[in-house]
Amino acid sequence: MTPSNCANGAVSPRPGDVTTYANRSVESSFDLLTQLGVIFDVQGRAAQIVREARASLAAFPPPPGERKRVLVAYPGMSMAMGLTVPAVFGGGIFDDIVNRAGGVNAFGGLSDQQLGAINVEALAAADVDVLVVGLYQPDDNADKYAAKLFAQFPRWPASRTKTYTSVSDSFYLGPLNAVAVKRISDVVRAAG
């Protein structure tokens, strides 16, 4: 397990691990890649991947104007997590990715416990300019999930404009965060 995830699911996590988990960011992905480079004795390759990812991220200037409110929802995870609404992602690396894409997370800064308590009313009351559909299983269909959420929450500006994109593995710690930033950035700019 990556050190930045040690507190995730731990019964009695150490305070330092809780802080590290809460503060995960795209930089944490770079730390993970660097650590894996040392573990597998491929430091040069790991450093190259980090350099390329940093260069990719630097190519996304912030969009002009007011930042759009972005909701990141994983409908396919709701059943796996025992939720009646899509799993909503916020805090740490998730906020960092949305911020780097030029948006602001509609449920940013919340803890895992707070995010797990989001209900239909909270989603209905949210201002959502851009919907990001997280794909969890190979057969998840972003178009169907987006259409269902837009029908369920017609008050969202994103529902009226049908503004959405999708992400999958690029939204977690790992080498592909720049992919998620680009996908979200493209839609945030178009919604501008």
Image: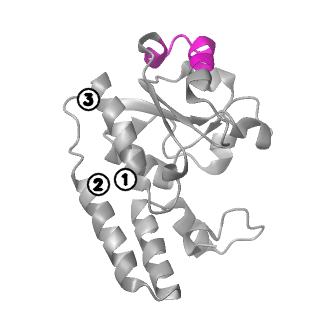
Towards the viewer: 161 or 105:
161
Q: Is residue 160 left or right of residue 48?
A: right
Give coordinates of residue 181: x percent, y percent.
37, 46
**Magenta stretch containing residue 152, yes or no?**
yes
- State the residue at coordinates (50%, 79%): 36
Q: Amino acid at mark 3?
A: Glu
Q: Residue at x 80, y 39 (%)?
A: 82
Residue most extreme to the front: 139
The part of the chain drawn in magenta is: 147-159
Looking at the rendered structure, the secondary structure element under dot 1 is helix
Residue 170, x across and y down, in percent: 48, 51
For label 2, the SS is helix
Return the mark for residue 156.
Answer: none
Residue at mark 3 = 66
State the residue at coordinates (44%, 62%): 175
Crowdedness of circle 1 by 10 Å Cα count: few (<14), some, many (20+)? many
Residue identifier under label 2: 57
Hey, what amino acid is under mark 1?
Ala
Amino acid at pointer 2: Leu
> Which of the 4 image quadrants contains residue 7?
bottom right
| Residue 3, quarter of picture | bottom right
Q: CA distance from mark 2 to mark 3?
A: 20 Å
Asked whether the beta carbons under mark 2 and mark 3 sit within 8 Å of each other, the answer is: no
Q: Is residue 12 magenta?
A: no
Q: Which residue is mark 1?
A: 178
Element type at mark 3 = loop
In the rendering, at what x and y percent does residue 102 appear? Answer: 30, 39
